[in-house]
Amino acid sequence: MGRPYELESSRITAVVENVQALKREGRLDEALQVLLPQLDLWENDAAAGLGGVAPWYYEQAAIIYRKLKRFDDEIAVLERFAAQPHSPGASPPELLKRLEKAKWSEARRNGIDAPKPGWMHSGTTSKQTIVALKTSIKPSATKLAIDQQPISDFIALDVETANADLASICSIGLAHFRAGELFRTLTILVDPEDRFDPVNISIHGITPADVAGRPNMAQVFPVIAASLADVLVVHHSHFDKTALARAALKYGTGPLPCVWLDTLRVSRRAWPNLSLDGAGYGLARLAKEFSIAFEHHDVAEDAKASGYLMLRAMQDTGLNLVQWIERVERPIEDDQQKIARPGSGSGPLAGEIIVFTGKLDVKREEAARLAAEAGCEVTESVSQRVTILVVGDQDLRLTKGQEKSTKHRKAEELISQGASLRIVGEADFMRMVSLDTDRDRPPR
């Protein structure tokens, strides 16, 4: 994610609180000494392609310069902002308006009868302008092409709220997964500027005292927006994405410029058989199912669990992240329609009932076609009817139970109970199909 992710906590907590305290004490020059080095850091990130700069730092510098009557410096810092890539939302256009107004005021001070900027004639207040921007801003069309190179890095995210209003975010958890491994986690406490419901406190344990003096979402958004620009963000259920969208509307910051992937939707497609017991696809249930250890309702822990769940779905289905982005947009039944099929009836493996699991070298549709042509009935779920489970060779080498797919573990359980079921690797399956096909082929 780059430097903003790694230093986010110190940047928000230390800089924001320090600047606000110095301003309250009237120590404006010292506040500038804290702010100005941050502009260099943001601009270095922007130059490295890590997203737009955060408006708050430039705005605060401009306000301080104006209080100090250093109007040339006010214009200079606003022009500096204008020259940079910007984070999404209402703040950048509002700050550019501040630049227009500062230049107009400077001209008036110099005796120049400059015309007012057009927007100053509208009669709308700054608040009304922000509200209008809130309703007009739409998320950018960030897409990952289904045929692009597989991606291996993603950020898992989770939020908690102070009350039933989803905009009342009081904590954000991030878990960075790099090349299929957990790299690091981060917890951000946020002042929701709202009341805390006792029910919510009982769930996540965060109290008003915990967030006192913490930044609000208007300050947090630019930082995480810069960190998550064009990043794949994994989350479990629509709650987190909706809460951040609601907070973005509340503070006029615009949506996060990332690509979202909901592991609840992933889970329903990866493990359709888990719906049979009525226990649902909640994060706690899935974590227990796949032996993922975590502390529920701790945002960083929940984010971590969602990330591990994503890795597990990739392992069990053989689909990579880009393929899953495309897969969740299709109905759950699509895979059953593509994979499940009757056998040919006359093939040498007629009477066998086969299931596939894990990552295969060939596409599932191709494996299913070969099995059906050899006479196998192809189905999706392991049951007492199934006679063959084909496991990707890579997955067949795994030894720890929790690393095996649900289908694999279910098959082993049935075998221990006396079921006539064989577990074979993909290479052996291909040999079976090839040999059986060759047997029926007339001699040359």
Image: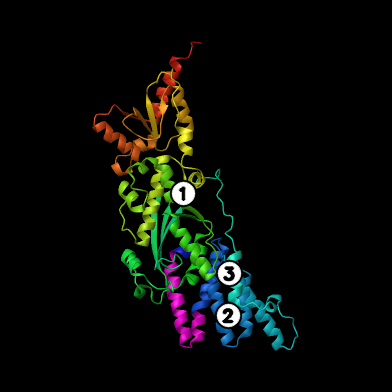
344 over 390 or under it: above or below: above
- Could you say where residue 389 lies in the image, as x and y percent from the top left? 36, 31
Check residue 25 for magenta coloring. yes
Q: Secondary structure at mark 3?
A: loop
Q: Could you tell me the amino acid type at mark 2?
A: Ala
Q: Earlier in the sequence, mark 3 or mark 1?
A: 3
Q: How is the image coloured?
A: rainbow
Magenta region includes residue 29: yes
Residue 237 place in picture, x, y as percent:
43, 54
Residue occupying the point 51% across, 85% down: 29
Q: In this rendering, is residue 404 above or below 102?
A: above
Which is closer to the viewer, label 3 or label 1? 3
Residue 423: x and y, percent?
A: 33, 30
Direction left: furthest residue: 417
Residue that badge 3 annotates: 90
Q: Is residue 419 visible?
A: yes
CA distance for labels 3 and 1? 32 Å
Which amino acid, by three-letter code, is at mark 3?
A: Ala
On the image, numbered disc 2 is attached to which residue?
62
Main secondary-structure element of the magenta-colored stretch: helix
122 or 312: nearer the eye? 122
Query: What stretch of residues is rendered in magenta?
Result: 6-33
Residue 206 position (above or below residue 355)? below
Give the CA distance from mark 2 to mark 3.
17 Å
Mark 2: few/some/many CA within 10 Å (<14, 14-19, 20+): many
Q: Secondary structure at mark 1?
A: loop
Q: Compare marks 1 and 2 and give the one earlier in the sequence.
A: 2
Type of the residue with mark 1: Ser
Give x and y (percent) for residue 310. 41, 49
Which image quadrant for residue 252?
Answer: bottom right
Q: Which residue is mark 1?
A: 152
Residue at 63% x, 71% y is 82
